[in-house]
Amino acid sequence: MSEERSLNFLEEIIEDDIRNGKNGGRVLTRFPPEPNGYLHIGHAKSICLNFGIAAKYNGKTNLRFDDTNPTTEDVEYVDSIKKDIQWLGFKWDKELYSSDYFDKLYDFALELIKQGLAYVEDGSAEEIASAKGTPTEPGKPTPSRSRSIEENLQLFREMKEGKYPDGAMVLRAKIDLASPNMHLRDPLMYRIKHAHHHRTGDQWCIYPMYDFAHGQSDSLEEITHSICTLEFVPHRPLYEWFIQKLNNFPSKQYEFARLNMNYTVMSKRKLLQLVNENHVSGWDDPRMPTISGLRRRGYTPLSIRNFSERIGVARRENLIDLSLLEFCIREDLNKSAWRRMAVLEPLKLVISNYPEGQTEVMEGENNPEMEGGDGLRHIPFSSELWIERDDFMEEPSKKYFRLGPGLMVRLKHAYIVRCDSFVKDESGNVSEVHCTYIPESRSGTDTSGIHVKGTIHWVCAKSAQTAEIRLYDRLFRVEDPSNEDGDFKDYINPDSLTVISNAFVEPDLMNAEAGRGYQFIRKGYFSLDSDSRPGKPVFNRTVTLKDTWAKESQKS
């Protein structure tokens, strides 16, 4: 029995709140994505945290879309976010949108104006920024700050009515221009945007800023624990200021370290650049850290949930090794993936003493790691096979235990064969390997008494089917591309994708199932890609069998 893990700091807070009867012992979290892109592995951590922590304490989680910027948001992103959350295995309590609260937020803004705590600013963005001062120098009031409450109410209503163009005016909170926290120096609350909204259409031309909308949306939903990432720590006083001045439900914000992972980028802006500039095939490109990309590559929901659990909840930023995510998917697929044989770089093997025209059926386990092997599959066998080119060496080294002149090897699930000769083509490349087999050495009934050190995989040439294989590797060739000199795209790994157009696979793979993992024996874990067509399967390598990058780093 494994040891029970210690509580993380958020669980300690929640358990303390429950003990003290805060919010009646109720726990309600929320996951509030902006629908301006696809979710990535960093969001997956937040999803697992918000939904998982609520479930642990018999609470609930709302899904709330932060749709306050109509120029960057789209229904496509809304749909993809919902699909990703469901795929990860979570179910939200209520599906909500910040736009649900536009009327309420507008009324809240009017209330703050009436209290003398908000005003309409008509200075330019540059003038506003300049008047805010610096972290070491206080800001200075603009002429707009002294407007009367009546004038501010009139101007704000006229902003709503569409009387002014984009950028002409904003609504600002009136807080403290000398505050050491720059977020409290009269922050923006509303801006003018004459843009079509994916839900409210053209009803609004003013839209609330995140810092105003987010806290009030939390409050309206009576969120008990609003869990954010560390960059929102300096925003918390403003979050609390709005709630206090409006006397709304006292939602509380708590911060944890966001997920940063090596050999990738996690910024939506940078991911959008990769998509728009065709460095990848789309948001779901299997090299992308998006949840849809990981799903297409063959990652499982369990592997991502386990990854999120392993990295834990921290209060300090750190860089997580991608190898840990790869370890989690290997661990899962080793237990669940079906074993199959595929030859990626084929070389013909001819068994000269095998009866011509004869075909046998060998048996192989679907997954020996599962109890009972998860059933058996039938594998055709004949005198002509395909093997991997690197499983033959014309002049084998001393510790080479595969095929070479005079060497013996076992064919997986089949017989022991001995290499007698080989044939070269006009270019001097080996084109065929000729062997003899030991009839008494059939796997499962071997009475030959011969022991060999090497076992190789193969595919029967008569029944072999062709498939496209896509070998994916890390998208970037440096650990932290965002912190390197120059453009982060300069560090894209040119070998992040290798396409093998005509690999040979055993016939059973023509019935491969989408969403199921396959271990191609000795080659890695693979999954069926959405580009597959009847009779033309495409397989993505999810991950190699071993951490090849760790070996490379040890060499360097």
Image (cartoon, grey):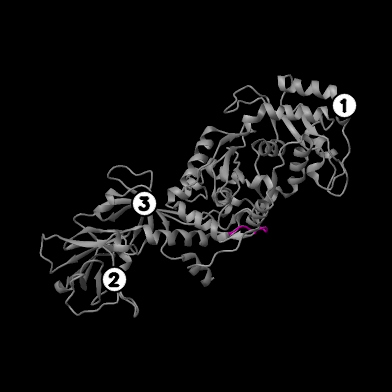
Whether the magenta-drawn stretch holds residue 382 is answered as no
Mark 1 and mark 3: span between their CA atoms? 65 Å
Instruction: Identify residue for label 1.
Output: 147
Estimate the x, y position of residue 11 in percent, counting from the top left: 63, 55
Q: Pointer 3: residues within 10 angstroms few (<14), some, or many (20+)?
A: some
Dominant secondary-structure state across the stretch colored magenta: loop
Under tag 2, what secondary structure?
Answer: strand
Would you call the spot at circle 1 few (<14 residues within 10 Å), some (14-19), or many (20 or more)? some
Disc ID at residue 516: 3
Query: Disc 1 vs disc 3: Cβ atoms closer than 8 Å?
Result: no
Task: Please name whichever residue, 64 or 170, is drawn nearer the observer in this view of the structure.
Answer: 64
Q: Secondary structure at mark 1?
A: loop
Place residue 481 in its image quadrant. Answer: bottom right
Eyeballing the image, is 440 above or below 310?
below
> Residue 201 placed where, x, y %?
59, 24
Kind of residue at disc 1: Arg
The image shows residue 247, relative to residue 268, as above or below, that is: above
Please tell me which residue is depicted at 25% across the width and 71% down the height of the picture.
410
Q: Position of residue 456 (x, y in %)?
A: 29, 68
Q: Amino acid at mark 3?
A: Arg
Q: Which mark is residue 455?
A: 2
Q: Which residues are magenta?
A: 312-317
Taking the image as shown, residue 95 lies to the left or right of residue 344, namely right
Q: CA distance from mark 3 to mark 2?
A: 26 Å
Residue 329, placed above or below residue 110: below
Q: Is residue 313 magenta?
A: yes
